[in-house]
Amino acid sequence: MKKPLYAGSVGQLTPWGYLLFLLLLLSFGCQAQEPPLSPGAATFKKEVKECIDRLAKPLVEPLSKKDLGAINETLKQAEPQAIKLCRMCPFRIGVLDKNGETLTVYPNREAAKGDFSGYDVVVQTLKNRKTTQQRFFLQDGSEIYIVCVPILKQEEVLGVLAMALGAEEAKKIWGVSEKEFLAIDFNK
């Protein structure tokens, strides 16, 4: 006859019972969860997600046709809504093709265009098909936050919607620190 995992009354576990109990505790305790956000960070996340919702779907068709004029028009049409509905005016928005090359930047700024295919935030967004964010330093030493969103048509990645914001502005407007920005999960 086999010995049970527990011996005798409740609370008296055998060594195997203790091991099983500890494994169960560890499996429940190690689940990754988004840390609780401050009210400012929660508002920031909500407003970024609203901006993503306003832009991602309307960009699918022009991006699938590689119609630069229609992509620019989509960004222009969304801008007045973004300013009225939230404080997104400090954002600069770019659209990259599926290779990480800049198609357009809004508001237009030639210096912001380039090949971003080697940037980890773009690589991860294209590879994992999930929204990804990262902090960067500009040549003048100032920090910017980048949020990259994959533009998908069914399962095909058409490109990336990239939003950039100065870290100082994020702190001043929403009270979002670098640590909080990097901890936000824009996919939930």
Image: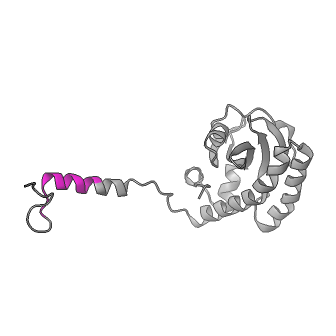
Residue 52 located within the stretch drawn in magenta: no
Q: Position of residue 65 (x, y in %)?
A: 86, 43
How many marks the image carries: the answer is 0
Residue 19 located within the stretch drawn in magenta: yes
Q: Position of residue 104 (x, y in %)?
A: 84, 42
Vertically, is 63 above or below 40? above
Along the line of sight, the residue nearer the viewer: 153 or 151: 153
Q: Position of residue 9 (x, y in %)?
A: 10, 68
Q: Considering the image in quadrants, where does the C terminus appear?
A: bottom right
Q: Considering the image in quadrants, where does the N terminus appear?
A: bottom left
Q: Quadrant of residue 82?
A: bottom right
* Residue at image coords 72%, 50%: 165
Vertically, is 44 above or below 91? below
Q: In the rendered image, is residue 51 in sight?
A: yes
Q: In the rendered image, is residue 90 in sight?
A: no
Q: Position of residue 51 (x, y in %)?
A: 74, 59
* Residue at image coords 66%, 40%: 126
Along the line of sight, the residue nearer the viewer: 140 or 72: 72
Stretch in magenta: 12-23
Along the line of sight, the residue nearer the viewer: 159 or 52: 159
* Residue at image coords 69%, 58%: 48
- By secondary structure, the bulk of the magenta-drawn segment is best described as helix
- Left or right of 188? Residue 20 is left
Colour scheme employed for the rendering of this structure? one colour
Q: Residue furthest front?
A: 1
